[in-house]
Image (cartoon, rainbow, N blue to C red):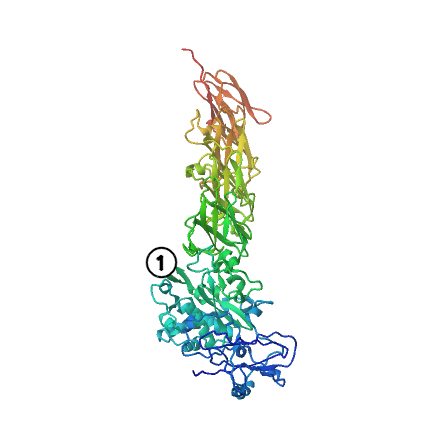
Amino acid sequence: MSAEVAIQKFSFPFACSARLAQQGEVTQKGCVQAKALETQILGESKPVGVIGALVHNDKKVQESPEAPAAQVLVSAEASQSAVVSRRTVFEKLTVESEDQRPAAKRQLSSESAARTITVVKKSAVRKEADEQRHLQPKVQPGRRLVTPCDAASGKRKRRKDLFTSSEVFHRVDSHVIRAGAELKEKRVYDVKAIVQSITQGARNELEKLRAIWVWLCNNIEYDVSGYLGHSEKLTAPEDVIAAGRGVCCSYSNLCTEMCREVGIECQEVPGHSKGIGYRQGQSLKHVKSDHLWNAVLLGGQWFLLDACWGAGRVDMERESFVKRFDDFYFLTDPEELIDSHFPDEEKWQLLDVPITLEEFERRVFKTSAFFTMGLRLIQPHHFHIVTVDGEANVSLGFSRPSTFTYEITQHQDLLHCGASEHKESSSSSFGLLTVSHRSMKLQLLPPASGTYDVKVFARPEAATTSLIWVCSFTVECPTPRAMEVIPENPFLSWGLQPVAGSLGIAGSCQGSEVAEVEEGVFDLVLKTSRPLMMLCELVHPEMEAAVAKRCLATQIQPDTLTCHVLCPMHGFYRLSVFVRDYEKAELKFQNAANFLLHCKGKVVGPDQLFPPNLGSACGPGTRTSEAGLSKFSHTAAVVSTQQGKCNITFYNQRDLELHSVLSREENKTAAFPLSRHLFCTYTDSKVTVSVSLPDAGAYRLGLYARIAPAGDFNPMCDFVLRNSCDQPGPPFPCVYSAWRKGCVLFEPRVGLLEPLSWVRFRVRVPGAQRVCVVGEARTDLKMNKSRVWEAEVFSGNGLQQLKLAASFGESSDMDVLMTFDIKQLDREV
């Protein structure tokens, strides 16, 4: 059988060891490989020349009178300048026999990664070796050949050491995509021609390799039909290129062939992968490996890449290929690829400390997005989790702000099933997801005994795309915890959102843990870095939205946001907070925080809810400060009284026209309108709002101001008045428009007088010329030294009201200031 002979010559330090393959090692039919000279540098010595050859013989190496088989020649006179370059050293020269199997079906033997040289007669190669000596570039003395074992020991270069970002390949990638389209249109299927075209302009080995990898990812689709056995798998390179489809060995074989064309050392690496068809937890001990990827030698170091996984993913539900370029699988760091790729030969792990197959099976599956987003696994260390007291915990760390969510479903055998994206249209109530400054914690609470699949999704905080699958776990729950229903959280996580800081939230009194509500009342206080507007939402699985609105009262201050919450039912509540900049009304409110409240003790009754129609600004705050209303006697939004009375005072620095309103739940009835239980007094810049409540319950006191002349009254703030006194408070007099600024009623302070009694009147009316009380008779009041009008007035028998009136200026007309009602006499029948 004839053979084509290839020759290679090396130089290496004198103190070294050389290993040749055993005579019986056969990697392909009819071929015996002599192992390449795995060297160890022991010191700087003179180089020696080694010549080897590959000859055809099934059983033994053919001998010659001139040169024994696998003869090693030592030349002490060889100079260091004869040391060959790395590309020349690692050129793999083999002789293919006529009955050699197709390249796509070759198996990587246990020795195929080692350097190989060919063995021929000394006399046949001496001349050619001398001719090529002057072509060999110089290298530093003491440099040795690099093997996968070398790559796994010592300090390795990482992908980031080769290039900082894939953007550096923009020129190369654009050329490859353009050239690939032209070649496809011209129906060019020759490997050599394609490689020459796509690597044109590449300046180094890295750019050439990038061009090959990008072409593979963009021009070859995974052959799902062939994988499933619906059609014949294509193996020949030209057939794969022409059809534009192939399985994993098609990608790896083409990568190897193309790299050979540009002189890059490339090996096919067989092994197990956690791709389509993989079942989490399955034992791979006696299972034949199912995947092929590549290892390439760059700069004296081996790197890993997988064009099959870089081209896209397989949708098994639709039995189709989803084309999606994934740059992660180009020169992937071994520490990251080992989570999904386990080579048959340990040396191709390229790890300082290789892992076992059992450890590979237990490892958490992480998608490429897990690594590209800079996530790290805090706990658990293995994919299978058994609940403790019905609970399992997952925790991830991140270096850049990120958004997370999760899905928990009944266990399915296949790892790659279901969606790889999360549209945020649904949310699970079987867990609590919280995000802190640099970590995410997921507390899983399966609803029943059984096994569940948990997928975690994430995306960068600023992204608006769907969340992407990043890792998976299996949760086994022997005994579930007795749990109340947790309300769904469409905003993904509990506690302050990662964007809260950028929205102006500086801190919170409540963390991401569950807040236990005592006495049915909870107060949330948020510190802000700038003035904000706030809206809140309270959700309980069994509570109506109308009732939920009456459970919230919010106070907005320049540096603080406060939300008062009432819990009328037992169980879990979701409290969501939305904010925007106070002065930017055109902006939309954004979710800043979500808190999970749990009420299991006392609850508030229906009659204790906040009054309806509360505004978003309760209590003094940013709005009142802007209007010049200051120094409030009551700074909280909720005011409680045990006597049914209270006086709220503040200063009106801009002398605005004010108006106040008292209201409560509409189904309540009273003898007098609620406006009679409210009385306002204006003296200089001080304002006093007096309230006398008719019975126990919650009331809304609204303050309004006319900011622009002739404009509408604008709401300033609402107060919630809680009255625990069962005794009805008397009404105030009915006030008319003539009662103006500066007028003060000292006595009587009630608007319902006893009949047939003498009542002392004391009142200050600035500018009045005459003040009197008109009833069954007219009684004039006299001004004392303090400019207070006063007199004793008889109330009468209650047949008519008492009217307090005054005249101003030169007019003799009397303007009614207010009226007083008289209780009816009890008449015997």
- Is 28 located above or below residue 537 in the figure? below
What x and y, as percent, mark residue 753? 49, 20
What x and y, as percent, mark residue 353? 57, 62
Q: Quadrant of the N terminus?
A: bottom left
Comparing 322 with 58, the one in front is 58
Comparing 356 with 368, the one in front is 356
Which of the 4 quarters of the picture holds residue 665? top left
Residue 512 can be seen in this image = yes
Please tell me how many numbered marks the rendered image carries: 1
Which of the 4 quarters of the picture holds residue 249? bottom left
Of all residues, the one furthest to the left in this rendering is 230
Which of the 4 quarters of the picture holds residue 2? bottom left
Q: Quadrant of the C terminus?
A: top left
What x and y, as percent, mark residue 610? 47, 34
Of all residues, the one furthest to the front in this rendering is 59
Comparing 158 with 10, the one in front is 10
- Is 460 located above or below residue 559 in the figure? below
Residue 765 can be seen in this image = no
What x and y, as percent, mark residue 544? 41, 38
Q: Secondary structure at mark 1?
A: loop
Badge 1 is on which residue?
Answer: 318
Q: Amino acid at mark 1?
A: Arg
- Is 502 located above or below residue 216 in the figure? above
Q: Residues within 10 Å of mark 1 (few under 14, many from 20)?
A: few
Residue that appears at 55% across and 71% down: 147
431 with respect to 232 (left or right): right
